[in-house]
Amino acid sequence: MALAVAKAESGLNTNAIHKNYNGTTDFGIFQVNSIHSQKVNGNLNSLFDPETNIRIAKQIRDGSGWGAWVAYRNKKYLLYLEK
């Protein structure tokens, strides 16, 4: 599930950036949103590090489930599930 979500969100691009209509920005493999900056002590550039990005994504998932990701909500991740 995690790999499918990451592929749908960023194509596994560690340097992926997406600016959202609400003024926030998504970073890295899991497209972690800038609203989670406190999880990286304000250092959003650290979200380009795959290990950090995955660790923070797991914290988010553990706290609020997969619904935090657009690719899960719109079911795009289904295209990347292993069959």
Image (cartoon, grey):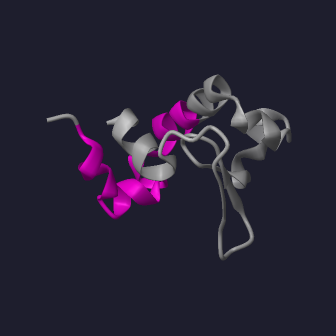
Determine the image quadrant of residue 42. top right
Q: Position of residue 76 (x, y in %)?
A: 32, 58
Residue 76 as seen in the image, left or right of residue 18:
left
Q: Residue at x 78, y 33 (%)?
A: 46
For the question of whether residue 65 can be seen, the reply is no
Q: Nearer the viewer, residue 17 or 59?
A: 17
Q: Is residue 50 magenta?
A: no
Q: Position of residue 71 (x, y in %)?
A: 40, 56
Residue 52 as seen in the image, left or right of residue 38:
left
Label the magenta part by its dominant secondary structure.
Answer: helix
Q: Residue at x 68, y 74 (%)?
A: 22
Q: Residue at x 34, y 64 (%)?
A: 74
Q: Which residues are magenta?
A: 57-81
The quarter of the picture where the C terminus appears is: top left
Q: Position of residue 34 (x, y in %)?
A: 73, 53
For the question of whether residue 41 can be seen, the reply is yes
Q: Position of residue 44 (x, y in %)?
A: 80, 43
Residue 7 as seen in the image, left or right of residue 46:
left
The quarter of the picture where the N terminus appears is: top left
Question: Tag count in the figure?
Answer: 0
- Judged from this view, the residue extending furthest toward the right is 42
Q: Is residue 21 above or below residue 80?
A: below
- Judged from this view, the residue extending furthest toward the left is 83
Q: Is residue 59 magenta?
A: yes
Q: Residue at x 62, y 28 (%)?
A: 50
